[in-house]
Image (cartoon, helix red, strand yellow):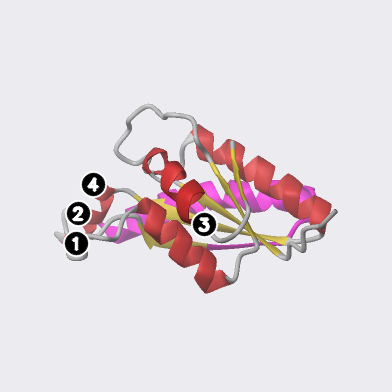
């Protein structure tokens, strides 16, 4: 029986309860394999457009994402798991092929992730929640093992 060699678990988040639950699974997997978690916060289409048109102050967005990722760091630290984080645009108004699923897979390659944990449950439809549009794509095209929770 083959065993998994996991050094880095990628957990895409968007501030939703579903992504928070996925992070809990990512931390559990990382703890089991003595791995690190990388949380990538994906900004939704409305937020991306607002930033690109200067309709919203980027510092406000940064504060919101930082508050969410701080909870991830706290949870991981409590379990003895190291965490890194980043922020990415989940959409592009200039590149049609940029969407949450492709951004997750690109991030997985960039950080050399060995395992991905993505939420699959439908979310409320809040414009900030972007991961509901990504899980199926990630499951179909990821080259790493994926846990969809």
Residue farthest front in this picture? 1
- Is residue 65 part of the magenta span, yes or no? yes
Name the residue: 26% across, 49% down: 45
Q: Which mark, by number, is residue 52? A: 1
Mark pair 2, 4: CA separation: 5 Å
The residues colored magenta run 56-85
Q: Are marks 2 and 4 in contact (CB under 8 Å)?
A: yes
The image position of residue 133, as x and y in percent, is 36, 41
- Is residue 97 part of the magenta span, yes or no? no
The image position of residue 70, as x and y in percent, is 58, 52
| Figure label count | 4
Which element carries disc 3, helix, strand or loop? Answer: loop
Dot 3, how many residues are within 10 Å of its Cα: few (below 14), some (14-19), or many (20+)? some
Q: Are marks 2 and 1 in contact (CB under 8 Å)?
A: yes
Q: Tell which circle, 2 or 3, labels the residue nearer the N-terminal end.
A: 2
Q: Tell which circle, 1 or 3, labels the residue nearer the N-terminal end.
A: 1
Nearer to us: label 3 or label 4: 3
Mark pair 1, 3: CA separation: 29 Å
Which element carries disc 2, helix, strand or loop? Answer: helix
Mark pair 2, 1: CA separation: 5 Å
Please give left or right for residue 132 compared with residue 149 in the image. Answer: left
Q: Which residue is mark 3?
A: 142
Q: Which residue is mark 4?
A: 46
Which element carries disc 4, helix, strand or loop? Answer: helix
Nearer to us: label 1 or label 3: 3
């Amino acid at each position: 029986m083959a065993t998994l060699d996991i050094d880095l678990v990628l957990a895409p988040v968007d501030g939703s309860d579903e992504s928070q639950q996925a992070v809990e699974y990512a931390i559990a997997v990382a703890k089991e394999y003595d791995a690190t978690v990388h949380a990538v916060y994906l900004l939704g289409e409305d937020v991306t457009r607002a930033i690109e048109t200067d309709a919203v102050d980027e510092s406000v967005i940064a504060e919101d994402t930082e508050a969410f990722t701080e909870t991830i760091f706290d949870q991981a630290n409590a379990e003895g798991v190291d965490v890194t984080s980043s922020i990415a645009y989940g959409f592009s108004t200039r590149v049609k092929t940029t969407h949450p699923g492709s951004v997750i897979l690109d991030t997985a390659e960039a950080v050399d992730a060995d395992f991905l944990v993505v939420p699959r449950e439908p979310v409320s439809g809040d414009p900030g929640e972007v991961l509901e549009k990504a899980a199926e794509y990630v499951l179909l095209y990821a080259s790493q093992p994926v846990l969809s929770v």
